[in-house]
Image (spheres, rainbow, N blue to C red):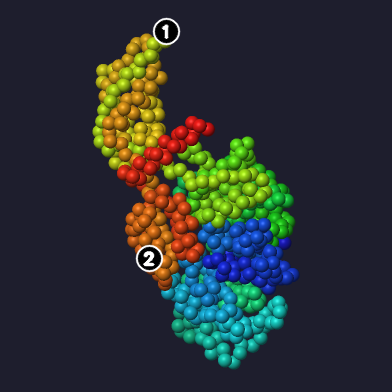
Amino acid sequence: MSYSTENIRNVSIAGHGQTGKTTLFERLLYAGGAVPRAETVESGKTVSDYSTEEIERKISIHTALAHLERNGRKINIFDTPGSSDFAGDVILAFRASEFGLLAIDGRAGVQIETIKLWRNLDGRNKPRGIFITKMDEDRTDFEKTLADVKEKFKVDAVPFTLPIGSGAGYKGVIDVLNRKAWFIQPGDAPEKEGEIPAEYKDPAAAALERLIEAAAEGDDALMEHYIDKGSLSPEEMHRGLIEALSANRIVPAFAGAALRNSGLVPFLDFAADIAPNPGAAGDRGTGADGAEIGVAIDPAKPLSALVIKTSYDQFSGKLSWIKVINGKLAADSEAFNVSENKKERIGKLYVCQGKKLEEVKELFAGDVGIVTKSATFKTNDTITAGDASMQFLHLRLPEPVHAVAVNAAAKKDDDKLGEFLVRAAEEDKTFRFVFNAETRESVISAMGELQINIILDKIRSNQKIELETHVPRIAYRETITKKAGAEYTHKKQTGGHGQYGKVVLEIAPLPRGEDYKFVNAIFGGAIPKNYIPGVEKGIAEGMAAGTMAGYPVVDVEVKITDGKYHPVDSSELSFKLAARNAFREAMRQSSPTLLEPIMNLTVFVEEKYLGDVMSDLSGKRGRILGQDSVGGIAEIRAQVPQAELLRYSIDLRSITSGTGSFSVEFDHYAPISGKIADEVIKAAEAFKVQESDD
């Protein structure tokens, strides 16, 4: 069955690890009648955690998608991973959704990943709500968690449900909006509707008044009416809440205990009746001139869609997850892949319940579906009915923070290994695989050690390839610190035409980051113009491998001042060889130095670990740039040499008992000397010997 845009809701469940997201997802599907029974994470049979790796590790690794129908609306629900190693899958779900639901453990409150997810939603101005989980467990506190949210995010979350008790005394929730209670039942039975207990009537009335105020904030006319009359009708309240949420002016709060099937029905009613439909949102793209533009989600316009995810299934093959932005996507039709500039035949079209595919004939604007076995579709591709003037912006993915060099133990398996690493990088855009020609290594990088280990373990077990890994080599650079000059004459006589070229040059340091500047100061035709390209090629070869450790040379100005040629024996090759040797000779005289990459590092840790993390960064030659602390979570900003961060994901996990996280990006190159430089040179020489032996 297909649903029109106004009858579609897209919700992403996200949160810190172990907050009960998958259980909430599973039980919502059960409460909505999408599955006949709800499974537990421990059983390995949940709708969302269906891969071998997820079942074995009892954690979510991939975003899963399922749907249910409520009040005539189709609700697509994304279940996302909680570990920062799989942040890319959370981002694709946020991109495809109009509402984010953050699961918050009623005992632990706001945690590090919650803060990062909230910031991501802020960057999108995305409507969001919170679901305070595990209300039936000891030490849960609904009001304390709301206060924690207020302290850390500076927002007053508006309760749409209130818990009836907590811990062992937990009995269910009050649906504030619809003025009824939902009580937990024995065993695995669904929650049951009932009257609000007498002792909760006053708190429920106060919460309803707060909802009415929130609704009034959704529209100026409603606010005036509320001020004049002191209240709103149910219809006005409903309309105001829709508008306030769509404009991201309120944050709804829910309580529940998913394993007891509690708090689910009120949330599903909210999702169907209050949560934004796709038509109230939009997307972003670039026009024909490259300028960024807003794109409304509109069923009346011609087809446009975005490929948000690529995955591979052992039975169905390649799966392309597609969010339809405009018009409709139909089975057995033709579409145009703007990113690849190719037509694509759409065969069968599906929606999914976890790993189960359900065939549909069409998907309308706002819906998410799957195309199988596409020849050209890949993540971030724009699909249209034939208009190539606009492309959707790519997913805003974080940069990988953990890298490993990898190779097959048997050289015969290298090509096969590369094939599966390329596929892994296509499935997860936060996983990168590149061959570094400079260090001559195949390097994979990802958001953490766990992500890399899962991918490599899968290749080992499925493809039977024995792998070797090691810490990647750093891409150091060499530069000069003072001016120098040199000349070199390349002369070779071999019978017939010989080789002759003389080059005189001067080199000087440039400011850091300016890379290279070539100045031709030849006068009087000492070197004919047609040989100057050969000179430049020779300089480029000289700069490709410096004289200290063989690393590329940067931030150098090279000025050609004189030279000499022979009318018969000179050639471009002769001047290239002369220039290369002249450059190397000049560099030896210019007090060369090594440069190392310096990274901008941002670390998120609980305040109790702040001292240990700062001390560790100091021991890593880090320079602290600043720090902020909000509600017990510290953010540390520093600059640290890349060489010190190669295993930082492992170090930070050890220091913070697995709770810390970080992001890292390249900033600049900085000089190194002394013992550190000596060790780099020694390692480079050892690598050269190893390469020659191989």
Question: From the viewer's perspective, is 490 left or right of 246?
Answer: left
Judge depth for marks 1 and 2 and give the one in front.
2
Question: From the viewer's perspective, is 395 left or right of 551?
Answer: right
The residue beneath circle 2 is 611
The x, y position of residue 543, in whole percent, is 37, 32
Residue 450 seen in the figure? yes
Distance CA(mark 1)–CA(mark 2)? 74 Å
Mark carried by residue 123: none
Q: Residues within 10 Å of mark 1 (few under 14, many from 20)?
A: few
Q: At 47% from the left edge and 53% from the top edge, which residue is drawn?
A: 647
Residue 327 to residue 337: above or below: below
Residue 372 seen in the figure? no
Q: Residues within 10 Å of mark 2 (few under 14, many from 20)?
A: few
Q: At 60% from the left edge and 85% from the top edge, which residue is drawn?
A: 169
Q: At 53% from the left edge and 41% from the top edge, which residue is drawn?
A: 442
Closer to the camera in the image, 347 or 317: 317
Q: Secondary structure at mark 1?
A: loop
The residue beneath circle 1 is 495
Q: Amino acid at mark 1?
A: Gly
Query: Which of the two discs, 1 and 2, labels the residue nearer the N terminus?
Result: 1
Q: Amino acid at mark 2?
A: Gly
Q: Secondary structure at mark 2?
A: helix
Q: In the picture, residue 528 is in which quadrant?
A: top left
The x, y position of residue 140, in whole percent, is 54, 79
